[in-house]
Structure formats: structure tokens, C-alpha cells
Amino acid sequence: MSLPPFRNEPVLELRRAAAREQLAAGMRELEPRLPLRVPVWIGDERREGDELVSTDPGDPDRVVAVAAMATEAEADRAVVAAREAFETWSRTPAARRADILVAAADSLRRRRAELAALEVRECAKPWGEADADICEAIDFLEFYARGAVALERGPELFQVPGERNEMRYAPRGVAAVIAPWNFPIAIPTGMVSAALATGNTVVLKPAEQSPGCGLMVVQALREAGVPPGAIGLLPGNGTAGAALVRHRDVATIAFTGSGPVGLEIMKTAAEVPVGGKHLKRVVAEMGGKNCVIVDSDADLDDAVPAIVQSAFVYAGQKCSAASRVLVHEAIADQIVERVAGAVDVLVVGQADMFGTDVPPVIEQEARDRVERYRALGARDGRLVAERREGAADHGWFVPPTVVADLPADSPVLHEEIFGPVLAVERVANVDAAMDRVDELPFALTGGLFARNPHTVHRVVQRSPVGNLYVNRPITGAMVGRQPFGGNRLSGTGTKAGGPDYLLHFVEPHVVTENTVRHGLVI
Ligand SMILES: NC(=O)c1ccc[n+]([C@@H]2O[C@H](COP(=O)([O-])OP(=O)(O)OC[C@H]3O[C@@H](n4cnc5c(N)ncnc54)[C@H](O)[C@@H]3O)[C@@H](O)[C@H]2O)c1
């Protein structure tokens, strides 16, 4: 049966009491089951353990999941199991694989409230963000299921008399999927479903901060009919990820995470292990330093809320979050004052409180890192806004902060902070702002607020970023609408949720047949 056209899963309208109640019911369902026990899960074999513990960033005494920590031997066994399962899964027709992925999407739909609640607890995602994350996971499953069916048909080639040419895309083999915690269900689901839809088998290594969410992804896929060997789960830290990257039989590595780890993975993957039969392919989505340019004619009623939302929602822990605002000097003072005013009314608080904009950051290490950048900003620049409320609370809160007048070489302007810190800079004009954007080695997202269409055109032509947003917030890419991913040191230029993404998980085979027959052998 063919699938209906793709459409994005609608997010819940949380201004409605009924929608809030639906999510609260999910939390009531989840809480008695905490802590979740997350096994190393290879084929039908489960090993539970308590070496890895994830806790609520808003209440670090609350244990959310207790996981086994995968060993190098287990990483090897998971790859071997995936290699064996590849024989069958790779020959399963794309339409059948698509049905299974769509069934997994249905299972996420059914458990949506409970899964959103898990993100609230394990990663301190505010409700609206958690719900959007589950919707994005559903979108990835539905989108790649359809894409793989279309890809299986192969492209049309030029044909001449006496010759038949065919091209098809074959799965590459075992894919190692290494995921971050900040979109703890959507990002692993996206990378895993792209690999599975195209006939690869997968070993998933979720982030050490979100093993519970990783378990939910694998459970949904297995319950929907993905054979156990075709999707393994390896909870653990970077060591387990590195063991997968090195493994001889891993053909593709789909990684989303920080720049330094991405670079290390690429270096390791470039070495062909003894007996290795693949040039390993790395699909890497990494960090950014995302700038928003505001021209003198911008509509500030649009620009200010969009900037504040892009910088501070989920405490700035989105790879797409705004971290620098480059504003035309004619309106710089006005922007600084209005951004500071908007920061003053942000809701800083626990993620499980409806309406929270800025929750605590993921862990103590993250809080300490962001605090170091805040201290640098306060020392070298001018503190324009700072909200200290959450600081007294139990949890890894960092005050949302805006700094201006930093020296050009400040690390606050050049390094990914990944927290609620925004720098505002004054520039002579849009071209000067573009020069600063161009100096950066990152090129993930960017924004522009301007009314003059010539200015918009000029910036679009010059911008190096993977996703440029004009006159709107710079976060919240939607599957199928805004294929997402960075350029330069922000990633391999692969676009998750876009038309070309699946091509990274396949290899092309061309068959040319001489159709001028030389007699019939009976
Ligand atoms: N570009 C994007 O689409 C995108 C999306 C989300 C997050 N990110 C980036 O991710 C980062 C935040 O996520 P994080 O803190 O989980 O990143 P991270 O790099 O610390 O970890 C990501 C994953 O890599 C694993 N890992 C760590 N060391 C490894 C190694 N040596 N070999 C193999 N795997 C290893 C971790 O265990 C984790 O599963 C930020 O830099 C953010 O910008 C990018």
C-alpha cells in the first residue's frame, strides 16, 4: 500500500488546558516507572547494569535512568550482530521497511506524552520543546520511509540501442549512530531511521546524559518490527562511541555532537583497519557560532522577540541557537535596551513548569563551562542583562546573560558556548557584519533582520551558513521544510530532513548489459 504524502506532525497547542493535561498525564504515567533500566541490547540479549546514571538537571538527586555501560567487547558483538542481520534487512523491500518505520512513528504518537515527560526529566527540556522533539522524531520516520521507497526505484539513465543501463542504490552495511543529548529522541531517531530505511543495520550509541531516551527509540523500532539484530543499543560514554568508529565492519558513521569529537571521529574513520573493506563514510553534524544580523531598517517588534527566543529558549542548548547579534550602529543602543527588557521577562525555571523558557543546563560540567564564559564576558565587556533567579534553585541553572562591547578577539565571540549567553556587537553596516560572519570557521545557522530586499539578496549571496533565516527566529527547522545542517567546521554539509540525506547511507551500483544477443544457451 502506498503511503499518503508526507506532512509534519502538528505540535500541541499548550495554551489549551486540555493539551497541558495530556502532557501532565504522561508525567504521571512515567514517574512511577523511574528510574528506567537501560540495557546493553544486542539482538535478543540484554545486559543490565548500573555503571551509568542519568539524573534530572533540575534536581540532580532524582535518578532518571540507570544504564549498563557498554564495553569494547560488547561494541564488537553489537556490530557482528548487525552485520549478520544485514543479510536479511538489506534484502527486505524498501516498501516493507517503510511500513515498519511508519509503525514506529505510530508508536511514538501513541506514547507522545510519556516520551515528552521523559525528556523533561532526563534533559530538562521544557514541555513545548519536548513535545516538538517527539513530533520531529515522528517526522523523520515518516519522511525517510517515503524517501527510501523513492530512492529504491533508482534514477533514469541515458539508454542507447543494444545496451541497458541501470543504476540502483544499495545499503552500505552497518551504520554506527552516535547521538547528542539535546534533541534526545529526534536526533537519534533521525539518524537511525535514515540508515534503516535504506537497508543498513544500526548500532545506536546514545549520549551518556540521555540513555533513557535512547532506549525509547530502540524499543519503538523493535516493537514496530525492526529485527532485533538490525538495531542494537549501546549505552555508554565516548569510549563506546570510539570503539564503534574504529570497528572494521562499520561502514557508515552518523554523528551529531561537538566539533572536537566530530573531528576526532573523522580522523579515526580515515584509517582503514586491517581487513577492512570500506572507506568509512562520516555524516557529521557539529557545533556552531550562530550570528543574527540586524540592519538599521529592521522591524524591531519582530527582531527582538525572535533574537531572545533564538538565544535563550532551552537555555541556548540548541546547535542552531543565536549567540551573537551584529547590529547596525544606528539602532544598536535601542536593540540593547529592548533585548535586555525582553530578557527580563523570560521565564526562568524548572522544565516541568508549563511556560518555562530557560531551564537549567544539562549537567554540572556544562554549568561550569558557561559560567567561565559569563565571567569572561563580564570582565572584558559590559553586562547588559542577567537573570539570577534560578541560581538559588536546586539544579544546574545558569543566569541568562547578555553582554555588549566585547573586544574583537574575545573567546565569547568565537567559541561555541552552548548555554544562555548572548553577545551584542555594534557594526557600521551589514557588509561589516558579513565580514565578521565570514571570519568564523563555523557555518551552521544565521539570521538577518532587514526590510530592503537588496540587502536580503546581498546577504543570501554571501552567507556561508547551512541555514539562513530571514526576518524570523533562527531555531526550529522542520523536517522536509528546512533541511538542516552546517557547512565549514559545523558539519559535512549533509542536510537532515532534506531530499539528499539518504544518499549518504547508500552506495550506487550501475549495471550495463549488452542486449544484442549472441544466441540462446539452452
Ligand atoms: N549540527 C547539528 O545538527 C547539531 C545538533 C545537535 C547538537 N549539535 C552539537 O552537539 C554538541 C552538544 O552535544 P554533546 O554534548 O552530546 O556532544 P559530544 O560531542 O560531547 O557528544 C556527542 C556524542 O559523541 C559521543 N562521543 C564522545 N567522544 C567520542 C569519541 N571520542 N568517539 C566517538 N563518540 C564520542 C558522546 O558519548 C555522545 O554520544 C554541541 O556542540 C552542538 O552544537 C549539533
Image (cartoon, rainbow, N blue to C red):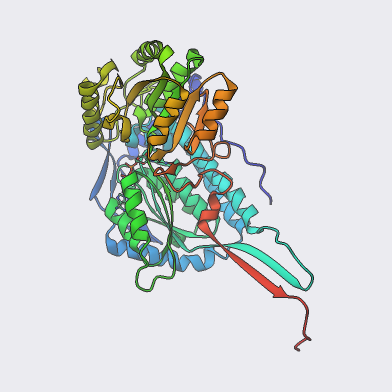
**Residue 11 in sight in this render:** no
Instruction: Give x and y (percent) for residue 271.
Output: 35, 64
In the image, 226: left or right of 392?
right
In the image, 410: left or right of 222?
left
From the image, which quarter does the C terminus lie in? Answer: bottom right
Q: Nearer the viewer, residue 389 or 338?
A: 338
Instruction: Give x and y (percent) for residue 291.
Output: 41, 29
**Ligand 1, what quadrant?**
top left
Q: Nearer the viewer, residue 127 or 362?
A: 362
In the image, 144: left or right of 402?
right
| Image-quadrant location for residue 159 | bottom right
Placement of 249 over or under 36, stated as above or below? below
Going by the picture, which residue comes out furthest to the bottom? Answer: 522
Q: Nearer the viewer, residue 475 or 452?
A: 452
Mark count: 0
Instruction: Give x and y (percent) for residue 107.
Output: 51, 44
**Residue 286 in sight in this render:** yes
The residue at the point 70 percent across, 67 percent down is 165
The residue at the point 42 percent across, 44 percent down is 488
